[in-house]
Amino acid sequence: MKIGSLFLFFASNVVVDAFVVPSQLDSSIARSSRLFNDYLSSLSGPPSSNSSPSYSPPSYSPPPPPPPPPPSSPNSPTGSSADSTDAIARLDASQAGIMGNIVSSIPDLASKPEFCYSGQETISGCSTKLDAFDAPGPSNIAWMSSLCVASKISSLTIFNGPLTDVPHLTSRCAILDGSIKFFLDFRPRSYGAYETVRPDGTYPGPEELGRQAFEYSGARKQFETNFGTPEVSGFLSSLSFESAVPNGVSSEFDTLTRGPLAIDVSMPATELNLNTILMAREKAAAIWLNWVLDGSHGHRPGAPVNTQYVYDSKYKQNAYSALLPIYSDWFGPTDGPKLAAADSGPLDEGYVGGGS
């Protein structure tokens, strides 16, 4: 099925200034408003663990391409099943190549060994690797996490620093009970009230939201012009999977942190689906890298950077709160929160990259 019909149009994060939704607005928007205001009044996110074993930072170089799947016989079905251990290994090899390209292209990207997992650690009994980076220089990457839990999940999480408006990137693929759960999102850096989208694709106007409707519309237009271009949206909508169905939203934080182009689907663990995901993740990372290397996306010094800094700090906490129930469901009440904290990086407001 085509993913264009599965796009979920939700907001990316909380607003910098609290707002009040008019009484005539529907209850779902009112709930979002209360959530925003509550969050603004309390910035204390869950503590992140800084403890990890001694670990030498990885030296990245693009690995050889992952081995192709074994040839099928003339009688093999198109949707032949993919073994979860082999599939995650192939996803991890592909992600290592992605990371090699990113690290070689961003010279100020530095490893954060105190946050890394070397592979000796386990999550749900499975070997776990996590390579963490940031770029405190001009590239201004606040956090980058390359995660692999053997036979379970491959995930790439990138939060950009406040010197640019380049979207954050989340690219995650889990294989659980024979089913692939795939999430891919370019996450906007300003609030566009994406969670208020109507079934026909329109948004509340000034008659419901007052002049703030123009602010939200402007944020959506800016993202569409600079990042959600026909080329990017066309690539995402062209992705085709076997028997894919949309996943439900896991929490209000999940609703608030999604971008307008988010893909969130479950599908059978077939070779066709796996190969499509491998291609999609590699291309999405290349698109993100091109944006980062394009100097036109930088903020002017001063107020825009400060505003982005405050916005991103709250967003990272919301993103952790969105990830927490997902990983808790997949990995249990002990390992799930541990992995969510590790994958999300430091949550204190002061840690948003060296350019702040």
Image (cartoon, helix red, strand yellow):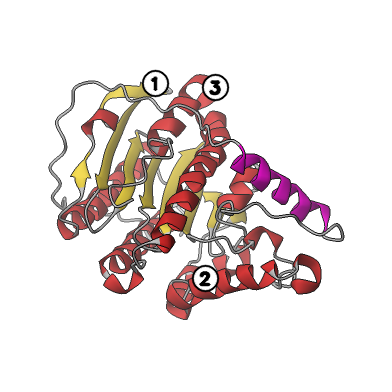
In the rendered image, the quadrant that contains the N terminus is: bottom right
Q: Is residue 271 rendered to the left or right of residue 90?
A: right
Residue 189, numbered circle:
none
* Residue stretch in magenta: 26-41
324, above or below 53, in the image: below
Residue type of the residue flagged with mark 2 = Ser
Residue matched to label 1? 125
* Residue 227, quarter of picture: bottom left
Q: Are marks 1 and 2 in contact (CB under 8 Å)?
A: no
* Residue 127, quarter of picture: top left
Mark 3 vs mark 2: which is more N-terminal? 2
Q: In this view of the protein, can residue 324 be seen by the observer?
A: yes
Viewer-side residue, 10 vs 314: 314
Residue 333, numbered circle:
3
86, above or below 114, in the image: below
Residue matched to label 2? 237
Q: Is 166 contained in the magenta span?
A: no
User: Residue drawn 28% across and 54% down?
Assistant: 140
The alpha-carbon separation of the residues under discs 1 and 2 comes to 36 Å
Q: Is 32 contained in the magenta span?
A: yes
